[in-house]
Amino acid sequence: MGETLDALRRLQEVEQQLAELRRGEDKRKRQIRIQKRNLAKSVDLIESKRSDERHHQMEVDRLDLDRKAREEALAKHRAALNAARTNKTYASILTVINSEEVDKAKLEARELEHMSEMEKVRAAIEKIEAEQAAQRERLAEAERLLHEYLDETANRRAALEREREAVAETIPPSALVTFNRVSDRHDGEALAEIVRLHPKRDEHVCRGCNMKVTLEIVNALQTRDDIQFCDACGRLLYLGT
Ligand SMILES: [Zn+2]
């Protein structure tokens, strides 16, 4: 096999190992993103629950003031009732008092409703906060796993990057450009082996796409150190050993 093809095969191996390291890193980063998203969701949820809580609290305060004002009014009406001189005055004050009592009872009922809603909202917030604590732990764990992975693979990654550089230096620039272009198109698999289908017959296929490879290409690879492409998939071909 030609030197250039040899170097390209080594380059592909190195790049694939680097790609595997990157996939390992991406996988762990994805976990971090998922945990961050979950956490952000529950932060938003708590925010909206707190706003509900404030709304109910404001209603309770407002109804409370209203109720107190009515109690004061009632006290005055009762004093007036005691001082009433005629039956007619007495009866009309009593009517006012009764209607104020009905209104006051309605206010109290609404106040209670808001208080009970507020209790529910607070319970929900507590539950979300407990989940949030677990989410924070999961996020911290995901971050720890990423750092651990990066630490563990740092040496290997650096060695592979050095090797990639060293190998690339031995490859003619035009071949390197071609390799990178084909590699991008085929997800890091720029090279494909030529497979002989039958030991006694000159039938060859590209392992990348399983399409036929002509004898002309096989002969060229046997005799020259230059690049041959698969007609079907465009990968750079090399002969199997
Ligand atoms: Zn092919």
Image (tube, helix red, strand yellow):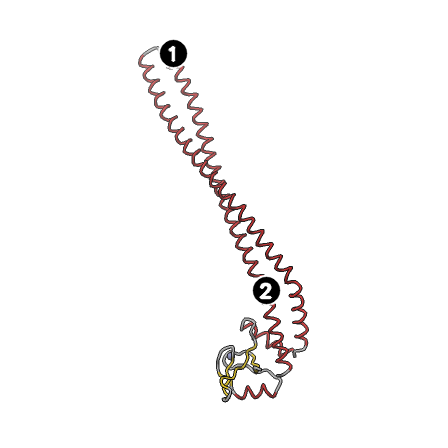
- Around disc 2, counting alpha carbons within 10 Å, would you say few (fewer than 14), some (14 to 19), or many (20 or more)? some
Residue extending furthest front?
Answer: 199
Tell me if the residue at label 2 has its CB under 8 Å from ligand 1: no
Considering the image in quadrants, where does the C terminus appear?
bottom right
- Give the percent coordinates (x, y) of residue 31: 54, 56
Instruction: Quote the CA–CA distance across marks 1 and 2.
Output: 91 Å
Front residue of this view, candidates 40 and 131? 131
158 sits to left or right of 232: right
Disc 2 secondary structure class = helix
Figure label count: 2
| Disc number for residue 83 | 1
The residue carrying mark 2 is: 22
- Around disc 1, counting alpha carbons within 10 Å, would you say few (fewer than 14), some (14 to 19), or many (20 or more)? few
Q: Is residue 224 above or below residue 178?
A: below
Mark 2 and mark 1 in contact (Cβ < 8 Å)? no
- Give the percent coordinates (x, y) of residue 19: 58, 67
Residue type at tag 2: Arg
Front residue of this view, candidates 167 and 1? 1
Residue shown at 49% from the left, 44% from the top:
128
Mark toward the start of the polypeptide (1 vs 2) = 2
Residue shown at 60% from the left, 73% from the top:
13
Q: Which label sits in the foreground, 1 or 2?
A: 2
